[in-house]
Amino acid sequence: MKRKAVLVLAACVLLSGLLALLIFVSVLAAILSQTSPDAQLLDAQVACTITGTRQKQDLNLTLTYDGLSVKGITGIVSGSGNFSAATKASGKQKTKMALPEASAAKRDVQTFMCYTAVTATSSDQYKLLNSSGAKDVGIYRKVNGRYVVALGSFYGSKIGTNYILQFQQTNGTVKTISAILGDQKADKDTDAKHQYHTIDGSIVEFVTAKGTSQHVSATQQQINRDFGTLIAIYRSGKAAVKLEGTIKETSISITGEVDGVALSASGTVKAGKVHAEGFIGQNAEDAGGGIYTGGKFGWPVPGHTRLSSDYEYRNCPFHGRELHSGLDIPAPLGTQVLAAADGTVRLSRFYGSYGNAVILSHGSALFTLYGHNSSLLVAEGTKVKKGQPIALVGSTGSSTGNHCHFEVRKGGSEYRNNTSPWPYLKKKP
C-alpha cells in the first residue's frame, strides 16, 4: 500500500510539473508572438509645412518635414488662382524604409567593426573609409560628419548612400543622426530579407575608430550609451517635388507629390506670405485637405473647464520663462482622464517631468499627451476609444497640485513637436 501511495504521489507531482511547463510555454509563446509597442513608433504619414512668397503671379516655396527642407519650388499662378510648381533646385529628401518584424531582430543592439579591418585598397569601402573627408571622432569613424555604418542589402548596397537613423533613448527623447553606408552585411549572414544579422540580431553596425578593436567590451558599452533602440531608417538624397493647387482670396489648397509620394496641405496667403500645413503619405489626400479639422477632440477632463495655465509663455516654477506646451486643467485627485479621440497607446509610464503620463497616437501624425496622473489605466500598444478612461488625475512629476496636463503633438514622432491644442478641441463644455 505504501508503495502504491508513493507511486500515486509521484504521478501527481509529475502531472503537476507537466501542467506547469505547459502553462509556462503557452505564456512564453504568447509573449513572443506579440508585437512590441515600439515596433511602429512613426506613423505612415509625415506632417509637412509649406512656406514661401507670392509676388504677383510668381510662387517661390519651401517644403519642410521632419527637419529636412526642399527649397526652390517655383511656379506661376494663373488669373483664376490655379497654379503648378516644381523643384528646379535639388533639396533634401528622405524615404522611410521598413524595419524587420521578426522577433530575432534586436533593435536595441547596435554592433560595430573597426574601419582598419577593411584592407582591400581597391574596394569602394576602403576608398570611402580613407577618403579626405574621413576622420575618427571619439570612437566613431565619420565621413564628412556622417556616421559610417554597415547595413543589410535590403537597405542598399551602394557604398556612399546616405541615411538618416533615429533611436529612442532611455530618457524618452529621440536621437537623429546622419549616416553613410561604408560596408554591407554579407547576405549569407543575414535573414531572408537581408535586414538584420542572424547571429546577434543587429540591424545597424557602426564602423568605429582605429584601436577600438582592442577594447571590444568598452566600445560596445559606449555605443549602447550613445544610442538606444532603433526606431527608423530613412534613405536620404535629392527631392523631386511637384505641386498644384488653388489660391482663393487668402486661402490656399495644395496637392502634389514628393518623389512620387502623395502630399496634401492647406493654409493661407497673406501680404504675399504663404503658409500651409499638411501631410506626406500614401493617404495624404484623405487627411482632411491636409489639415486636421478642429473640434474633433473631446475635452479630457469633463466637468472641469478652468485652466491654471494655457498654451502660452509663462514663468514656470521649475524651468523659468518658457512656452507652456499644453493646457493645465485642475481637478480633484483621482478624477478620470478621458481619451480625446480614438487611438493607440504609445506610452503609459513615468515620463520625466510629466510624471505618470499617457501618449496616444491618433493617426495622421497626431498625438495627445496626458500628464501628472496618479494612476494609469491603459497599457502600451492597446487601442482606446474616444471618451474611454485612460488615467486618474494626480500631481506626479514636476507639478504643484492635482491637474491634468493635456498636450497635442503634431509630426513624425510622439516625443516632440508640441502645438496649440485649441484648433483640435471642441469648445470647453
Image: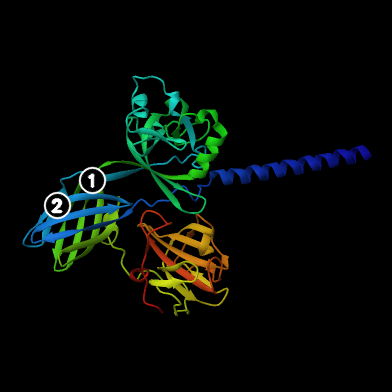
**Where residue 267 sits in the image (x, y, percent)?**
23, 64
Relative depth, front residue between 225 and 346: 225
**Where residue 338 sits in the image (x, y, percent)?**
48, 69
Viewport quadrant of the C terminus? bottom left
Sort mark 2 into few (<14), some (14-19) or many (20+) by Cα contacts within 10 Å: many
Relative depth, front residue between 52 and 158: 52
Relative depth, front residue between 320 and 334: 320
| Cα–Cα gap, marks 1 and 2 | 13 Å
Q: Secondary structure at mark 1?
A: loop
Q: Is residue 11 left or right of residue 319?
A: right
Please name the residue that numbered disc 1 is placed on: 91
In the rendered structure, which amino acid carries the disc numbered 1? Gly
The answer, for residue 390, to whether it is visible in the render is: no
The answer, for residue 221, to whether it is visible in the render is: yes
In the rendered structure, which amino acid carries the disc numbered 2? Thr
Q: Is residue 170 left or right of residue 184?
A: right
Viewport quadrant of the N terminus? top right
Give the residue drawn at x 58%, y 66%. Answer: 375
- The vertical placement of 86 against 220, above or below, is below
Give the residue drawn at x 57%, y 75%. Answer: 333
Q: Secondary structure at mark 2?
A: strand
Relative depth, front residue between 23 and 413: 413
Tag of residue 74: 2
**Where residue 309 sits in the image (x, y, percent)?**
43, 75
In the picture as drawn, the residue positioned furthest to the right comes out as: 1
